[in-house]
Amino acid sequence: MKIAIVDDDAALLASLGSLLRSEGHEVLCFDNGLEAFWLLADDNPVDLLIVDNIMPHGIDGDMLLQHLPDRNYPVIMVTGYPEDAKQLDLAGLGVSALLPKPLDLDQLRKAIAQPGKAAE
């Protein structure tokens, strides 16, 4: 599976990318939403997007999702502020799962395995 990860936390980005690669996934890592936007908007298909909701530089996760045209892949949103993220129209943004930080790897694996499940 080709997975794009967008998160401003360099340590999380590196460890999550490494973990998913070790499980056989092709992984693209972005440390900011704008960089991810340019690659993903340029018809670079992925099978799944994992995106942090709050990023201090440029585009937040919800803004990224609002501006990516014609997405046909599921989205897992991760956040250190789950109560704030629940205020978003997650279904309207195409978010299939909302996971709190720190990430529970079993929850993440389950969300990756069942990417079509609607966000709670």
Image (cartoon, rainbow, N blue to C red):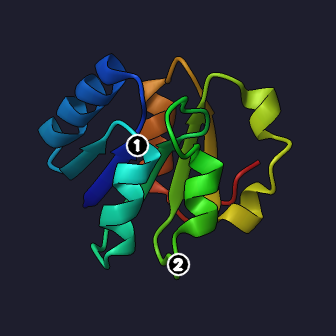
Residue at 35% x, 63% y is 38
Which of the labelled discs sits on residue 103, or is there none?
Answer: none
Is residue 117 positioned above or below 79 on the image? below
Q: Which residue is mark 1?
A: 6
Q: Nearer the viewer, residue 117 or 89?
A: 89
| In the image: residue 52, left or right of residue 118 | left
Q: Which residue is mark 2?
A: 69
| In the image: residue 100, left or right of residue 31 | right
Residue 55 quadrant: top right
Q: Are marks 2 and 1 in contact (CB under 8 Å)?
A: no
Report the number of discs: 2
Residue at 80% x, 49% y is 88
Q: Give the residue type at disc 1.
A: Val
Residue 110 visible to the viewer: yes
Residue at 60% x, 39% y is 53
Residue 63 x/y as whole percent:
63, 54
How packed mark 1 is, by other alpha carbons closer than 10 Å (few <14, some 14-19, many 20 or more), is: many
Q: Residue furthest front?
A: 58
Residue 84 quadrant: top right
Q: Nearer the viewer, residue 63 or 76?
A: 63
| In the image: residue 51, left or right of residue 67 | left
Residue at 55% x, 29% y is 56
Residue 91 x/y as whole percent:
74, 63
| In the image: residue 111, left or right of residue 1 | right
Mark before the other along the chain sequence, 2 or 1: 1
The secondary element bearing badge 2 is classed as loop
C-alpha gap between disc 2 and disc 1: 17 Å
Residue 47 visible to the viewer: no
Q: Give the residue type at disc 2.
A: Pro
Is residue 92 positioned above or below 55 on the image? below
Is residue 34 positioned above or below 104 on the image? below
The secondary element bearing badge 1 is classed as strand
